[in-house]
Amino acid sequence: MRHNHIHHAHHGRGGRHRARRGAVLDATLLLLDERPMHGYELITELETRSDGRWRPSPGAIYPALGRMEEHGLIEAAEVDGKKQFGLTDRGRERLAEYRASRGDDFVEPWNDTASGPRGDLRGHVAELVGQVRQVGRFGTPEQIEQAAAILTDAKRKLYAVLAAEPTEVDDSSDDA
């Protein structure tokens, strides 16, 4: 299942967290599973739960909500003249798949993105495990073979990274 990818506005003062692809979608489903909310409530909840490290802009949230509505994951109701969003059965199904794909390593997206580079690695690994499981479950023999080749290549490249001499750190790309 391909998601529409959403990037967040950067949070000031060196907090530059680029959320994982699809993180807004997953986070929104998790929050709406608790109760229906307005768009701005979702933004403030995400900010609160990530201790201010993650504040999706309205420009990220509203288009995401629109797309989720088109895909039938959420539905909007007018409450006091404002749009309130709630999960549909399909949204709940999608959320169950998301939780299952993360298994024991389940971390809420707002905690996941906010834990710095090591947390990002954990998130990538969890996502990778989910994808590998999907290929193993539903892939053709060709797809399974391709996936195995990709993983073998990735392992080789990771060993090369570990074996390389640490180079001078270039701080232009760093969030120090």
Image (tube, rainbow, N blue to C red):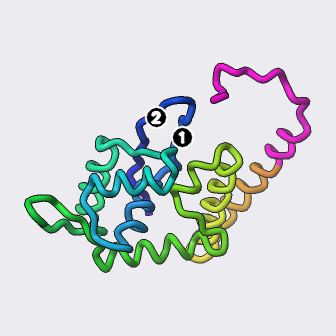
C-alpha span from label 2 to label 1: 7 Å
Q: Which of marks 2 and 1 is nearer the N terminus?
A: 2
On the image, the x and y values in percent for residue 87 come to 30, 73
Looking at the rendered structure, the kind of residue marked 2 is His
Q: Do the residues labelled 2 and 1 touch (CB within 8 Å)?
A: yes
At a point 83% along the width and 47% down the height, the residue shown is 156
Q: Which of 176 and 28 is in front in this view?
A: 176
Query: Which region of the structure is painted magenta?
Result: 156-176
Residue carrying label 1: 17
Disc assigned to residue 10:
2
Taking the view exactly as shown, the residue that stands out farthest to the left is 81
Q: In this view, does 50 lie above or below 136?
A: above
Q: Number of callouts in the render?
A: 2
Q: What amino acid is found at the position of numbered circle 1 in the picture?
A: His
Q: What element carries label 1?
A: loop
| Viewport quadrant of the C terminus | top right
| Residue at the (48%, 31%) spot, across then down | 12
